Amino acid sequence: KAKSEGRSTYHFFEAGMDAELQQRRSIEAGLRLAMQRNELRLMFQPLLGLAENRVACVEALLRWDHDDRTISPVEFIPVAEETGLIVPIGEWVLHEACKTAASWPGDVRVAVNLSPVQFRHKDLVGQVKAALNEAKLEPTRLELEITESLLLTESESIIAALHELRGMGVRISMDDFGTGYSSLSYLRSFPFDKIKIDRSFMRDLTTRTDSQAIIKAVIGLGQSLGMLTTAEGIETEEQLAMVRAHGVSEVQGFLFSPPLQPAALANLLHSEVAKTQLRKKAS
Ligand code: C2E
Ligand code: MG
Ligand code: MG
Ligand code: MG
């Protein structure tokens, strides 16, 4: 009797398991095999330096081709973080991004997103060094983007790892600035090289004066702290004109370029270099 009751409870649970949980389970199962099946790839989105009027940096963005569709990192990164799979996946991203960047013309930097979970792994610094060595990429050509949530713990070992990376010449950016908690205090916990202002502030930039005031203040803050600023999610000329007027260092967004396949990005960089050479010849 007891046994059959247990069974029916189990079946009840399974039938009642919500769609979201099932979705997560299937993502997890697929993700475990994604690397060996070569289903992961990187797209590359340029960040335009406004003073130089050229691509200053390119952000690597992860994609997962699975079951005839491409799954967004917004969907699978959280699952990868919960299961710890983000550690090997993140290591793959570092190697792949550095290898790709080593083939680009000029001194364009590559930006890699790091999950807080990767910092819990003891040898993150060693992983970064290995990726740079293998690709023969100068550390000064690598930027690491971290989110504010990372510093929630304010752990000394995380800050120490950031300092060690920075000592090597790697740049450290704060990503999605303005979305987390007590952002301002984080700016004191570590001397970031760059602040990336979250794209939610760009969305209503032309209609809301409060968003304008916030953007202006954050750019000013970056300037006083000696940090570069990037405006994420620039989609219109109007948004570009506004952040430019406030003195932002770099812009990233669909107006300039969406994330591109590696070959398309390389073409863009090569044509930019060709144009610069032409200008030099003409002058
Ligand atoms: P993020 O680091 O803030 O990356 C910028 C996101 O904004 C990208 O979404 C990009 O495609 C999107 N974006 C860029 N310009 C525009 C624009 O003008 N308009 C709009 N609407 N969107 C724009 P994506 O590629 O879907 O990535 C989402 C997030 O997933 C990233 O946000 C990052 O937090 C995370 N992510 C991506 N790749 C990796 C990775 O390799 N490792 C880790 N840990 N996280 C990653
Ligand atoms: Mg990012
Ligand atoms: Mg961002
Ligand atoms: Mg973002």
Image: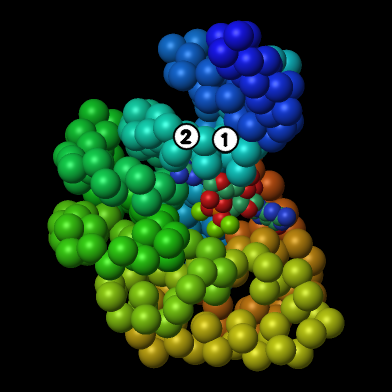
Residue 255, how many percent across, how many down? 74, 58
Q: Is the Cβ of the residue at disc 1 closer than 8 Å to that at disc 2?
A: yes
Q: Note whether residue 163 is visible.
A: no
Give the spatial CA distance, label 1 vs label 2: 6 Å
Is 276 situated above or below 151? above
For the residue marked with disc 2, what is the amino acid?
A: Ala
Say the numbered circle drawn on residue 225.
none
Residue at 44% x, 12% y: name it. 36
Residue at 37% x, 51% y: name it. 116
Residue 51, how many percent across, how many down? 52, 73
Pointer 2 residue = 80
For the residue marked with disc 1, what is the amino acid?
A: Phe
Residue at 61% x, 86% y: name it. 214
Q: Label 2 CB, ligand 1: below 8 Å?
A: yes
Numbered marks: total: 2
Q: Label 1 CB, ligand 1: below 8 Å?
A: no
Q: Relative to the observer, which residue lies in front, 169 or 49?
A: 169
Pointer 1 residue = 76
Is 19 situated above or below 246? above
Q: Secondary structure beneath disc 1?
A: helix
Mark 2 Cα within 10 Å, few/some/many (few <14, many 20+)? many
Identity of the residue furthest to the right in this view: 207
> Which image quadrant is residue 124 in?
top left
Horizontal relation, residue 140 to residue 104: left or right? left
